[in-house]
Amino acid sequence: MTDVARDPYEVLGVGRSANEADVKKAFRRLAKTWHPDHNQSDPKAKEKFAELNTAYEILGDSSKRQQFDRGEIDAEGKQRFQGFDPSQPRSSAGGSSQGFHFGFGAGGPFSGGGASGIDPSDLFADLFRFKNKDPRGRRANAAGADIRVEATISLADTVSGAVKRMTFPDGRVLDVKIPVGVTDGKTIRLKEQGQKRSDGGPAGDAYVTVKIAPDQRFVIEGSNLRHHLSIPLETAILGGRMRVPTLQGEVEMDIPPRSSTGRILRLRGKGLAAGAEARGDLLVSLDVTVPQQPDPELEALMRRRRDGL
């Protein structure tokens, strides 16, 4: 990264009027482009990705964004020194008066009497409060910047749990435990696994947002899953056994006779985690198929049924 951090609005390519959704969309798009895993031959990818994280750390947090817009923090999220304004008139003694009248009489702002009295020790404490700050104006105990990354898991991982190996912007590789029952968009906090401070102060946190990869076999409906099962005409009429996919592997299911398209059968406990021990169901929607090749015997039978013979 450069010596002077760029404006986070410029880094993410959004205007100052951009809303929260626009900021998040821009960050995700650029993060996918510059993720180190996708740019292993580009030595600048890690720096670019870290710069994106720092920018989103500010603009993705409404409080920090307001602080930045007011000039209270810089492009790295560090506190700016709020000292005297050199443009203000200076006192006759050569010191900056900053617009204050230091009168101590009964009518002055430091008089102790009346409801408008101000304790001068409180005012000077606010003006010269350097306690717990390092020479650059930051709080000495402030943590480093947080890191935000995404982890994509399979639908099956939500049932059994998983350990996802992830590469962070600074090159560290960590095994992140994905808990059972995690839902799409859930964020996992890794305490003090964010960016480290150069002065040895505490590191920030890492936030891992979980994304569940699409599974062509199932549709998620809360804690339940839905699967569309094609059955041949003879099974729909006579009944039979069909193999059905689940997140734990295929199982056999009994198809009742005279089953029509749209009928729903239920496999209990074969859905997603719905709590510490509970689990949703797998809903199997039947789709009856007819033979694509000519079948004279079947066609003759259908004619007799149609004609009432």
Image (tube, grey):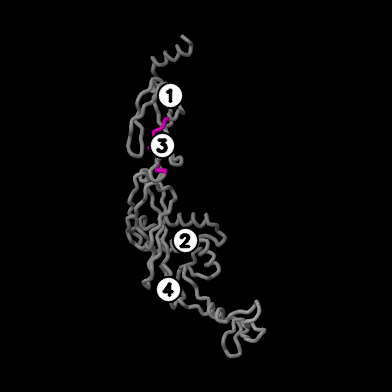
Nearest to N terminus: mark 1 or mark 3: 1
Q: Can residue 63 be seen in this view?
A: yes
Query: Marks 1/3: CA distance?
Result: 20 Å
Q: Is residue 284 above or below residue 143?
A: above
Query: Marks 1/2: CA distance?
Result: 54 Å
> Of the numbered discs in the image, which one, if any, rests on residue 56?
2
Residue 142 is one of the magenta-drawn residues: no
Residue that carries the numbered disc 1 in the rendered image:
259
Residue 65 x/y as whole percent: 52, 64
**Which tag is nearer the camera, tag 4 or tag 1?**
4
Name the kind of residue labelled 1 in the image.
Ser
Q: Is residue 45 visible?
A: no
Q: Residues within 10 Å of mark 2 (few under 14, many from 20)?
A: many
**Which tag is nearer the camera, tag 2 or tag 4?**
4
Q: Toward the viewer: 218 or 100? A: 100
Residue sitting at 36 percent across and 29 percent down? 253
Name the kind of residue labelled 4 in the image.
Ala
Q: What element carries label 4?
A: loop
Q: Do the residues labelled 4 and 1 touch (CB within 8 Å)?
A: no
Residue sitting at 48 percent across and 60 percent down? 12
- Residue 230 picture quarter: top left
Nearest to N terminus: mark 3 or mark 4: 4
Residue that carries the numbered disc 4 in the rendered image:
140
Nearest to N terminus: mark 2 or mark 4: 2
Q: How crowded is mark 4: few (under 14 residues within 10 Å), some or many (20 or more)?
A: some
Query: Marks 4/1: CA distance?
Result: 71 Å
Q: Do the residues labelled 3 and 2 touch (CB within 8 Å)?
A: no
User: Which residues are the magenta region?
Assistant: 265-274
Nearest to N terminus: mark 3 or mark 2: 2
